[in-house]
Image (cartoon, rainbow, N blue to C red):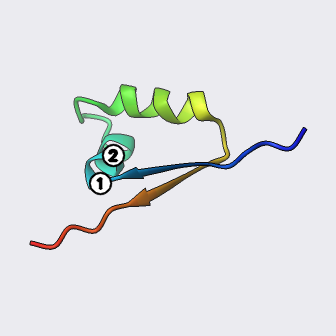
């Protein structure tokens, strides 16, 4: 069976959580990715300030 590609829209805080080991949500972000497997595409929302 072919795996579906899952997509998620996020902001940069998710990127910080994934790479920042001292970030408060680092473990949660890792678990989110692990539950979805290797077929997850993150779309980072661009913010205009």
Q: Do the residues labelled 2 and 1 touch (CB within 8 Å)?
A: yes
Camera-side residue of 45 and 14: 45
- Location of residue 25 with respect to 12 vertically, above or below: above
Q: Position of residue 40 (x, y in %)?
A: 59, 47
Task: Please name which of the two marks, 2 or 1, marks the residue nearer to the observer.
Answer: 1
Q: Mark 1 points at which residue?
A: 11
Q: Which residue lies furthest to the bottom in this view?
A: 48
Image coordinates of residue 36 in percent, x first then y, are 60, 34
What is the crowding at mark 2: few (fewer than 14 residues within 10 Å), some, or many (at least 20)?
A: some
Left or right: 22 in relation to 7:
left
Lateral position of residue 1 relative to residue 36, left or right: right
Q: Is mark 2 on a helix, strand or loop?
A: helix
In this rendered view, identify the residue nearer to me: 16 or 40: 40
Residue at 29% from the left image edge and 48% from the top image edge: 16
27 left or right, relative to 8: left
Q: Percent from the top left, x then y, of residue 26? A: 33, 32
Q: Which residue is drawn at 66% across and 43% down?
A: 38
Residue 47's image quarter? bottom left
Q: What residue is drawn where x is 65% and y is 36%?
A: 37
Judged from the image, the secondary structure of the residue bearing numbered disc 1 is loop
In what quadrant of the picture does the C terminus appear? bottom left
The residue under label 2 is 14
Determine whether 24 is above or below 10 in the image.
Answer: above
Q: Which of 13 and 1 is in front in this view?
A: 1
């Amino acid at each position: 069976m072919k795996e579906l590609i899952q997509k998620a829209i996020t902001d940069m805080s998710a990127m910080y959580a994934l790479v920042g080991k001292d970030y408060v949500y680092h473990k949660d972000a890792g678990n989110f990715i692990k539950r979805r497997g290797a077929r997850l595409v993150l779309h980072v929302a661009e913010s205009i300030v």
